[in-house]
Amino acid sequence: MRRTRYLQSLFAAAVLAAPLLAAADPRYAVTAIAGADGVARDINNLGQVVGAAYTGGVYRAYVYGDGGLTDIGTLGGAGSWANAINDRGQIVGNAEAADGASYGFLYSGGAMSAITGGSVMQANGINNGGTIVGSMFVTTPEDSYYHGFTLSAGGTLTDIGTLSYGDGSRAFAVNSHGDVVGAAANVFNGAPNRPEDPFIYHDGVMTGLGNLGGPWSGATSINDQGQVVGFLGVNSLPGDPGELYPTTAFLYANGEMNVIGGVAPPWSSLANDINNLSQVVGSFRFNPGLDHGFLYENGEMIDLNTLIDPASGWTITDAAAINDLQQIAAQACRGGVCQAVRLDLVSAVPEPPTFALMAAGLALGLARGKGFKRPARRRRG
């Protein structure tokens, strides 16, 4: 199995971040789609958003579209959470059953059903062909941990295994070709922290994409061109920026790892999704407790708050997903209330601003990671 190689060096950045300025003309309009504390997780090419709405003291999975917001129910228990939706309107997530346990579900044709075939299955992603990915509990003489799986529309369940240097995996997303990405343990018997590397699973082979020495890294999304995004854990940052486990967003394309922001203090970032236009969305933190959503395109990371009307009063704190129409499922706060929103392109949209979101982050965020090798295995006490 080929292993990716560790990023040999990072460019130093000695400049201050440029001031963030509001765009003269808004690129996106903001629509609230769930009540207070509601969460958005995914959006399909029909503009349908899924996530979880907070109601009655519990989270309930929903789908939002032209007909408004629909509670899609549970598996007989109190709560549920939708993680992904395809262009056929099929939704996967996790829900409580009457026994109080959580199980993966498929919502299709107006009905929710439990995903079966493995033990303690959790569902995280689905493609347009109906292939579901997630994690299930596996027990063997050598191993007792979660393994990533694929479940075809025809019901074929495949354990995608682990990296050769670890003992567990979790699958988060799958593209139209059946390529899977997620996070896999990068040591054996790594409890309690169980450090992970991002991986891509292609043609039956799982390949680790390396890390930056931090305890947890993962791949969160893959588009149909095979471009992968996610986050790399950073072992430590100079200047004590206040992040216990800082991460930096990455874009992996054509066999190369590109750090796209967040390695220089006080930056910390996370990429959540990539569409087929190679646009990436996620969040970054530049002060403790202060997160903003970002859009990364054409080599630039842009604060989404510069692309909306400042008079709206919204602050975009996280961008969860982006479709091929450039609509974004996000989190936003206004008047002390945070909830799920959808960002829609407005008419007569000007070209996006060309300023960089961060000088320090991008200076080494565009450091090319060709030349990776795995660092020595590390255990955390």
Image (cartoon, rainbow, N blue to C red):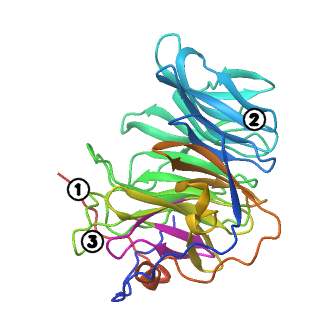
Q: Is residue 107 magenta?
A: no
| Dot 1 crowding, Cα within 10 Å, few <14, some 14–19, many 20+ | some
| Three-letter code for the amino acid on which mark 1 is drawn | Arg
155 or 106: nearer the viewer: 106
Residue bearing mark 1:
379
Residue bearing mark 2:
90
| Three-letter code for the amino acid on which mark 3 is drawn | Leu
**Image location of residue 58, percent across then percent down:** 49, 23
Asked if the residues shown at circle 3 and circle 1 are in contact, with their CB atoms under 8 angstroms apart, the answer is no
181 sits to left or right of 195: right
| Three-letter code for the amino acid on which mark 2 is drawn | Gln
Span shown in magenta: 249-271
Image point (52%, 48%), residue name: 334
Can residue 115 be seen here? The reply is yes
Residue bearing mark 3:
237
Q: Nearer the viewer, mark 3 or mark 1?
A: 3
Image point (63%, 67%), residue name: 307
47 sits to left or right of 246: right
Secondary structure state at the residue bearing disc 1? loop
Tell me which label, 1 or 2, sits earlier in the chain. 2
Q: Is residue 261 magenta?
A: yes
Which secondary structure type mostly characterizes the magenta part of the structure?
strand
How much space separates mark 3 and mark 1, taking CA atoms?
19 Å
3 or 380: nearer the viewer: 380
Can residue 204 be seen here? The reply is no
Q: Is residue 302 above or below residue 47?
A: below
How much space separates mark 2 and mark 3, taking CA atoms?
41 Å
